Amino acid sequence: MTRARRQTLRLALIGWGAISRRIAALLAGASDIGIVAVGVRNAAGAADIPAGARLVTDPQALAGLDLDLVVEAAGREAVALWGEAALTHAAAVAVASTSAFCDTALLDRLLETAQAHGSQLLIPPGALAGIDGIAAASLLPLDAVVHRIVKPPEAWRGTAAEGLVALDGLTRPATFFSGTAREAASRFPQNANVAVISALAGIGLDRTRVELVADPAAGGNGHQLSVRGAFGKLDLAIENRPLATNPKSSEMTALGLVRLIENRIRPLVR
Ligand SMILES: NC(=O)C1=CN([C@@H]2O[C@H](COP(=O)(O)OP(=O)(O)OC[C@H]3O[C@@H](n4cnc5c(N)ncnc54)[C@H](OP(=O)(O)O)[C@@H]3O)[C@@H](O)[C@H]2O)C=CC1
Ligand SMILES: O=C([O-])CC(=O)C(=O)O
């Protein structure tokens, strides 16, 4: 028997900002992946979507597009607005704005929709590396997960950090927040989506500890993860180059999403 695998993955992107544009640029030469729709809330800023893609502003317009995958890279509110329609009309939905999952009722509702429609909600690694290791380790009891996020002061501008630390004129690293992953992602939805990713891979939103640091000497957006448990010890550090068009978001987030997209269609999953 020959299994049928599609020749071309039918992909929709929700949001046409820094991450979606980077994904589209990285996939430009991929003949086996077609961006068939881009979902926006304001069509005015989306004149340059990929040729052949349909511009949609209503989540219900995802119906009838025969989608294999929807990738959300729009913002926390967009997950509630687009999530259920996407899980109804596509085989899988990957969410970048994972801070939305601090709302447990929303996550439960999306999982019910996925269950009802035979689709899957995918949590990409975001700006992180090593999430596969944490998720595997969590099959045995975990004692502690600590996630330290270190970014240059400009990455924290326009966020609640401004009320906690004087970002201008910092000469040393300043740890301005220490708390649970749920608190971190709720209060810093543009900078701490990753806290939800490490938390859902490991010991959950209320047991994962997060520290947020503004460091004038930081060469990029850094993530330091420390995991302890019955599996052993995991320590990792990654320093990501920010996206040129959004210093809050890392290049790695787009790269991780491209890997996820390719793995949905390529014969070799890596
Ligand atoms: N998981 C992770 O590790 C990471 C997650 N992120 C998250 O990914 C998301 C995208 O990041 P990035 O591309 O850098 O952000 P940008 O701000 O560059 O782009 C977001 C885009 O989404 C659009 N948008 C906002 N709301 C909606 C909506 N309801 N429907 C459709 N489009 C909408 C905005 O359009 P406009 O405002 O013009 O309407 C904007 O063009 C953010 O939530 C960010 O916090 C980022 C980095 C890492
Ligand atoms: O890109 C990063 O370093 C992480 C990020 O912005 C987020 O989690 O929202």
Image (cartoon, grey):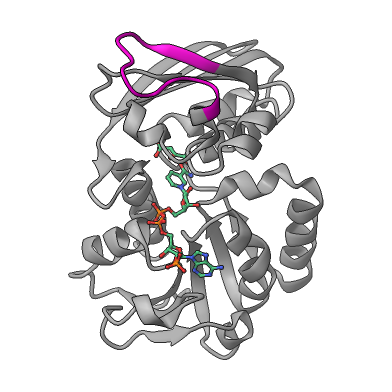
Give the image quarter of residue 59: bottom right
Q: Does residue 270 show up?
A: no
Residue situated in front as seen by the camera: 49 or 198: 49
| Dominant secondary structure of the residues highlighted in magenta in the image | loop
Give coordinates of residue 168: x percent, y percent.
Answer: 34, 23
Give the image quarter of residue 174: top left
In the rendered view, does 263 fall on the left or right side of 239?
A: right
Question: Ligand 2 shows up in which quadrant of the image?
Answer: top left
In the rendered view, does 167 fall on the left or right side of 97?
A: left
Q: Residue visible at 65% across and 19% down?
A: 179
Q: In the rendered view, would you say 245 is above or below 110?
A: above
Residue situated in front as seen by the camera: 223 or 152: 152
Q: Does residue 137 show up?
A: yes
Residue situated in front as seen by the camera: 88 or 139: 88
Is residue 170 covered in magenta?
A: yes
Give coordinates of residue 111: x percent, y percent.
Answer: 75, 58
Q: Residue visible at 48% across and 63% down?
A: 71
Q: In the rendered view, would you say 28 is above or below 137?
A: below
Is residue 84 covered in magenta?
A: no
Which residue of the protein is positioned furthest toward the left in this rendering? 29
Give coordinates of residue 31: x percent, y percent.
Answer: 23, 75
Q: In the rendered view, would you say 245 is above or below 166?
A: below
Q: In the rendered view, would you say 219 is above or below 270?
A: above
Q: Residue visible at 39% across and 60% down?
A: 261
Magenta segment boundaries in residue numbering: 163-176
In the rendered view, does 212 fall on the left or right side of 144?
A: left
Q: Residue visible at 69% across and 20% down?
A: 140
Give coordinates of residue 87: x percent, y percent.
Answer: 65, 70
